[in-house]
Amino acid sequence: MVFAPIVLFVYNRPEHARKTVVALQNNILASYSELFIYSDGAKNDHAKAKVDEIREYIKTINGFKQVTIFNREKNFGLATNIIDGVTKTVNEYGKVIVLEDDMITSPYFLQFMNDALDVYEEVENVACIHGYLYPLNTILSETFFIKGADCWGWAAWKRSWDLFEMDGKKLLKKIMEQKKQHEFNFDGTYNFLRMLKGQISGRNDSWAVRWYASAFLANKLTLYPGISLVNNIGNDASGTHCGESNVFEVIIADRRIDVIKIDIVENKLARSSFVSFYKENLSFRKRLIRWLKRLLNIWDHAVYSG
């Protein structure tokens, strides 16, 4: 097996990056894997000290077959940094494993990614391999498929990344023309369409919603593990594009996930479990209630302290 290169994107969160790298170093295939690190340039003087700290740290990273560092001279922004880095790497190597600086991986993450990339390499309907799984209440099969693509610890081939459409307007137009708004929003339980519209209008700079939409419109599938191999530690309000929430916290797998070729169809039970998770945790009403509770807690603390 030719192991896929790993691309890691970092910016100005040195503590998150250290934890991400240490977990990756503990992967059983780390020493066989090439690591490419893209360090984005500082957006302003306030960010420069942390960016400099990150860059000093990444120079010390070892434990991989080879480490190559790309220090951006200017601030690309998250989306451009990722799109450019993924495109260059996958065009050269034909496949890629992608992580951001807030992803804690299981020791079996790289094994799963490489196994799945190998098993489904020639299966055109499979666009993406994903390492993270929501904390669901349902016990799912060892691996399963969901329509679209995902972004928290993932892998793809050149053939599938070539589907990526930069222009959010084109993606939105196709979704509307094909009347797939409800399906795109997981039966109306999470407003991915609003996220896409926000990207178009400049309210956000999401590459991930465009990746999801590109694969979704092409009727491609993503392979997930039945147990999460990734925990996202970035939902602590430390990042540019994330808020604070613990609803995504998971216990990562302590064993290898077996990858065998399964039916290339969306798993209905898994999809309904995703819908339930969105409905219970990410709907506007639920998020508003959590926000009000935090506000009341802050108010109560202020009154008590005063």
Image (spheres, rainbow, N blue to C red):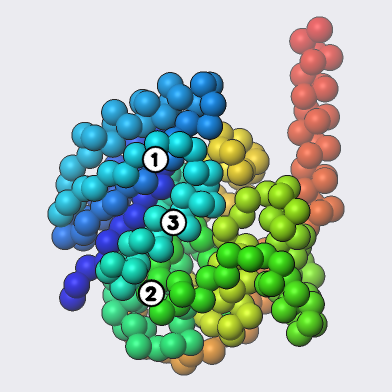
Which residue in the rendered view is the most extreme toward the top? 306
Q: Residue at x 68, y 49 (%)?
A: 204
Q: The C terminus lies in which quarter of the figure?
A: top right
Instruction: Using the numbered discs, state the Cα–Cα distance from disc 3 to disc 2 in whole angstroms.
Output: 13 Å
- Horizontal and vertical percent for residue 115? 29, 75
Which residue in the rendered view is the most extreme toward the bottom? 263
- The residue carrying pointer 2 sits among few (fewer than 14), some (14 to 19) or many (20 or more) residues within 10 Å by Cα, namely some
User: What residue would you read off at disc 3?
Assistant: 84
Q: The N terminus lies in which quarter of the figure?
A: bottom left
Q: Nearer the viewer, residue 71 or 179?
A: 71
Callouts 1 and 2 close, C-beta under 8 Å: no
Q: Is residue 168 left or right of residue 12?
A: right
User: What residue would you read off at disc 2?
Assistant: 158
User: What residue would you read off at disc 1?
Assistant: 72
The three-letter code of the residue at mark 1 reads Arg
Q: Nearer the viewer, residue 274 or 97?
A: 97
Callouts 3 and 2 close, C-beta under 8 Å: no
Secondary structure at numbered mark 1: loop
- Horizontal and vertical percent for residue 61? 22, 39
